[in-house]
Amino acid sequence: MVNIIWGLFIIIGIIYGFINGKIDIINSEIITSSKTALNLMLEMIPLLAVWTGLMRIAEESGLLNLIAKKLGFLLKKLFPTIPEGNEALGLIASNIAVNIAGLGSVATPFGLKAMKELQKLNDKKDTATPAMITFLVLNTSGVTLIPTTIISLRLLHGSKNPTEIIITCIIATFCASLAGLVLDYLIRRKNGNN
């Protein structure tokens, strides 16, 4: 749906440019935007590679499993329908741990694997379970202690203090997570899916 909306915006903008005789500006922006996007990707890839490597080391060393065990009590409360010891809980914990580090793109594989495991527990394959919805809420709004991607972008664009956003990111993501989980709980309770 978002692709359709953005596609319509682009088409409307191009038509508007044609009508107003601004086709030279459209051509210029297409070239400039492509170059900017490519430069941004080339600048971000090394940073993402470093953080992905660190997360891989954390996974291989057992650090993510340790975090999963520490989060076990909280996860059992948030996901009461997932059997204890199920692989989905470890994957969810890993996803949360990586999101806390501000690496949403690195967290994606853990999230996809967690959803596959949750789907195995699902009796109605065409309907999301309450655990899947709770995980989606938690993954989308995830608390971020160190917004590494944002800090990297700010650093690449010449920010004098790229880390000044840490406190506001912590507050914003904490409030988003809390609001999302409370709303999820209230809806589950209303629907009888405790």
Image (cartoon, grey):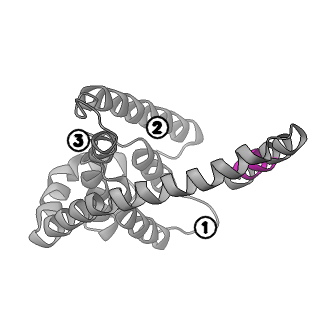
Residue 124, label in figure? 1
Residue in the image at 71% along x and 43% along y: 25
How many labels were placed on the picture?
A: 3
Residue in the image at 49% along x and 69% along y: 119
Q: CA distance from mark 1 to mark 3?
A: 37 Å
Residue 24, image x, y percentages? 75, 47
Q: Secondary structure at mark 2?
A: helix
Q: Earlier in the sequence, mark 2 or mark 1?
A: 1
Q: Is residue 6 above or below residue 165?
A: below
Q: Is residue 13 left or right of residue 145?
A: right
Residue 65, label in figure? none
Q: Is residue 193 above or below residue 124?
A: above
Task: Report which residue position mark 2 lands on.
Answer: 185
Residue in the image at 18% along x and 68% along y: 59
The quadrant holding residue 153 is top left
Q: Residues within 10 Å of mark 2 (few under 14, many from 20)?
A: some
Q: Residues within 10 Å of mark 3 (few under 14, many from 20)?
A: some
Q: Which residues are magenta?
A: 5-11
Per the image, is 8 magenta? Answer: yes
Task: Report which residue position mark 3 lands on.
Answer: 146
Disc 2 residue type? Tyr
The mark closer to the camera, 1 or 3, is 3
Q: Earlier in the sequence, mark 1 or mark 3?
A: 1
